[in-house]
Image (tube, grey):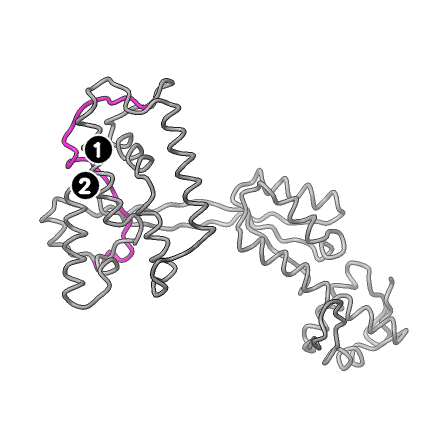
Amino acid sequence: MVLEETLLLHNEEDADKFVSFLRGNHCRAQKITDSFFFNETLVTGPIKGVIRFYEKAASSASAAGEHPEKSAGLLELPVLQNLKSIRDLVRDLMSRFGAGEIIYTTAEYEEHKAKTVSDVLERLKSAKADDPSISGIDKFRKMIAEISPVMDTVIALDAAGWVKTEPDGIRLVQKNDPEELPVERRVQDADAVDRDALKEFNLTLHDHIYYGTEIRLVIDPRIHIACTADEVEEALEGLEVDEEGVDTLLNNLNSKSVAINSVLSAIRKAGKCSIEDLIEKMDDVPLETEDSKDKISAHFSEEYVTSLVNDLRKIGLIEGNDRKLRAVR
């Protein structure tokens, strides 16, 4: 069925909310639970070792004329500069505060968080690079590395048990050697990682496998006459849903409405129409445009027209057999 749609949502509660919206518009949807799994490999160990490991890989790559930040098999984010910034900030905190002291008040930390989010959004919005030859991922990598490391540092300290979050702020639990702060960074290609370097810098690879479920909705073709794209977009706002799936669904609602209107228009003009005649009419359909002088034509395959007619019969927009098709409205 060419008018049947699907959409992935990440939890059943949000799926039920969208199904309720569809039912309120007299459109049915079937819920199907799909399973998935994915894995990620992390290089873990003291920050001094991860930095030296990254430096060694980058140096070897530069000597070989390769991209220095891709050869280590590490994901590009966070980059070496970011790791060094974290280490340097931990050094500063350990030198200025004693065990049991507040290193950031709640107000100070919230201010850092707000500034970090603001910086990220502003940099993403402007998307300007000093060097026009820098690729998109390089640009994003550079952006992250330049942003204040306070949030990354507190997250790492908390994971290591060096600090704890209290109502008053972030409290230092114990003073430790900043070089020994445990960190982990994602690996793109475990096979590309230098195993000897891992041993040299006292690092390990940790592979994580995650299993989960998501809800796939199979939506009745009636959605194309029951809801507008704007109404669907509004109903999905705030739900945990596959973003690419939303884009596809909204695009389908808009583009398939052209097909539906073209078929109904052709049948109405003929009064009654056989499927064979309709297929011929739909081979080359000029489309009217309001704001453009350009010509636009739509071309529908025989299989698409046949399937579309069957769907339109099911939702009550077409009546009759293949010899005498009639548009209901």
* Membership of 181 in magenta stretch: yes
User: Of 267 and 181, which appears nearest the observer?
Assistant: 181
Q: Amino acid at mark 2?
A: Ile
User: Of 297 and 204, which appears nearest the observer?
Assistant: 297
Q: Is residue 123 above or below residue 264?
A: above
Closer to the N terminus: mark 2 or mark 1? 2
Which residue ends up furthest to the right in the rendered image? 271
- Residue 297 visible in the current orientation: no
Magenta highlight range: 170-192
Q: Amino acid at mark 1?
A: Val
State the SS at label 1.
Answer: helix
Task: Report the residue marked by disc 2.
Answer: 47
Task: Report the residue marked by disc 1.
Answer: 90
Question: What's the mark number on residue 156?
Answer: none
Q: Is residue 305 above or below residue 95?
A: below
Q: Which residue sits at x=36%, y=28%? A: 109
Apparent side of residue 182 relative to residue 216 in the rendered image (left or right): left
* Membership of 318 in magenta stretch: no
- Measured as percent of width and height from the top left, residue 7 is found at 58, 52
